[in-house]
Amino acid sequence: MAGYEPKIIGFLCNWCSYAGADLAGTTRLKYPPNLKIIRVPCSGRVAPELVIRAFKEGADGVMVLGCHIGDCHYSTGNHRTARRMPVLRALLEFTGIEPERFLVKWVSSSEGELFAQTVREFTERVRALPPLRERMKS
């Protein structure tokens, strides 16, 4: 669709991924402005209901970014994310939402370039899909 810019919601762990986003910004790394960041204490606190609600409220794509496995500031929060999000991905696919619209990734506070690259790649991936909000209206 010409002129289509996807709306992307990113749930970012305060300790790692949000700090990685901050590093990307302070080092002036370029990434699309499509991402709206929601800062969460830990990726383990991102309930599947939040992801589903983001899609229902008009997001074309949702990212959950957290600390690398073994580096969680709350010990096992990202393990919880790693267990729950694949189940959520299957549920989204069952409801007709393409799995390409959902991303879980581990990005540390020192990985500003990885954060920017992840946002660029995910935005392009979602941009290649038709707008989800048009399908959700019907």
Image (tube, rainbow, N blue to C red):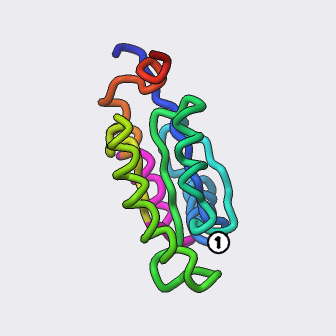
Query: As shown in the figure, which amino acid type bears the numbered disc 1?
Result: Trp
The percent coordinates of residue 54 (x first, y second) are 57, 40
Q: Is residue 131 above or below residue 64?
A: above
Q: Is residue 83 above or below residue 105?
A: below
What residue is at 43 percent from the left and 70 percent from the top? Answer: 82
Q: Which residues are magenta?
A: 106-121
What residue is at 64 percent from the left and 71 percent from the top? Answer: 15
Q: Is residue 132 above or below residue 36?
A: above
Residue 111: in magenta span: yes
Q: Main secondary structure of the magenta part?
A: helix
What residue is at 46 percent from the left and 33 percent from the top? Answer: 60
The percent coordinates of residue 128 (x first, y second) are 30, 30
Q: Secondary structure at mark 1?
A: loop
Specify the quadrant of the image occupied by residue 94: top left
What residue is at 57 percent from the left and 71 percent from the top? Answer: 109
User: Relative to residue 30, is residue 26 drawn left or right?
Assistant: right
Rendered-image quadrant of the N terminus: top left
Work out whether residue 23 or residue 36 is closer to the camera in this orientation and state it: 36
Residue 7: in magenta span: no
Q: Is residue 95 above or below residue 83?
A: above
The percent coordinates of residue 130 (x first, y second) are 34, 24
**Residue under circle 1?**
15
The answer to whether residue 46 of the structure is visible from this angle is: yes
Local crowd at mark 1 within 10 Å, few (<14), some, or many (≥20)?
A: many
The percent coordinates of residue 17 (x first, y second) are 56, 64
Rendered-image quadrant of the C terminus: top left
